[in-house]
């Protein structure tokens, strides 16, 4: 089972903002331990005041969540099984 981590390296519009690579290094991402645990990660440069990078960051995250869901369930059909689904009109 994989784990997905999205880190928003905000304030990239400021001159003293940490580079996303430095954020990753300081958080210890990309370490052998992280790889062993199956952590997929991305440090995304963003500037919330202009929303720069936000759409790309959340698109990446949504794609990873969808991949995980598909891998776990093998279908997009999330209707409750059995009687519960019939009662709720699924």
Image (tube, rainbow, N blue to C red):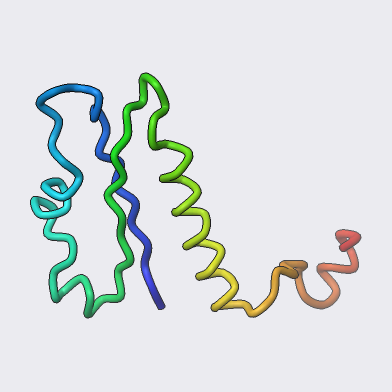
Give how far across and how far down residue 52 sits, in percent: 39, 30
Q: Which quarter of the picture shows residue 56?
A: top left
Count all numbered tags in the image, as a single digit: 0
Q: Which quarter of the picture shows residue 31?
A: bottom left
Give how far across and how far down residue 90 sits, in percent: 87, 63
Q: What residue lies at 56% left-to-right and 69% top-to-bottom?
A: 69
Q: What residue lies at 13% left-to-right and 37% top-to-bottom?
A: 18
Q: Is residue 32 above or below residue 52?
A: below
Q: Is residue 62 above or below residue 47?
A: below
Give how far across and how far down residue 62 sits, in percent: 51, 54
Q: Which quarter of the picture shows residue 46?
A: top left
Q: Could you tell whether 10 is left or right of 28 in the image?
A: right
Front-most of residues 50 and 5:
50
Q: What residue lies at 15% left-to-right and 46% top-to-bottom?
A: 23
Q: Could you tell whether 46 is left or right of 78 in the image?
A: left
Q: Could you tell whether 33 is left or right of 85 in the image?
A: left
Q: Could you tell whether 68 is left or right of 5 in the image?
A: right
Give how far across and how far down residue 6 sits, in percent: 34, 51
Quarter the N terminus occupies:
bottom left
Q: Is residue 66 above or below residue 75?
A: above
């Amino acid at each position: 089972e994989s784990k997905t981590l999205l880190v928003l390296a905000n304030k990239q519009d400021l001159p003293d903002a940490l580079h996303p690579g430095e954020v990753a290094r300081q958080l210890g991402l990309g370490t052998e331990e992280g790889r062993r645990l199956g952590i997929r990660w991305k440090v995304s440069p963003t500037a919330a005041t202009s929303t720069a990078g936000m759409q790309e960051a959340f698109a990446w995250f949504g794609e990873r969540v969808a991949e995980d869901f598909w891998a776990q369930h093998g279908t997009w059909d999330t209707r409750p099984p059995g009687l519960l689904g019939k009662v709720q009109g699924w």
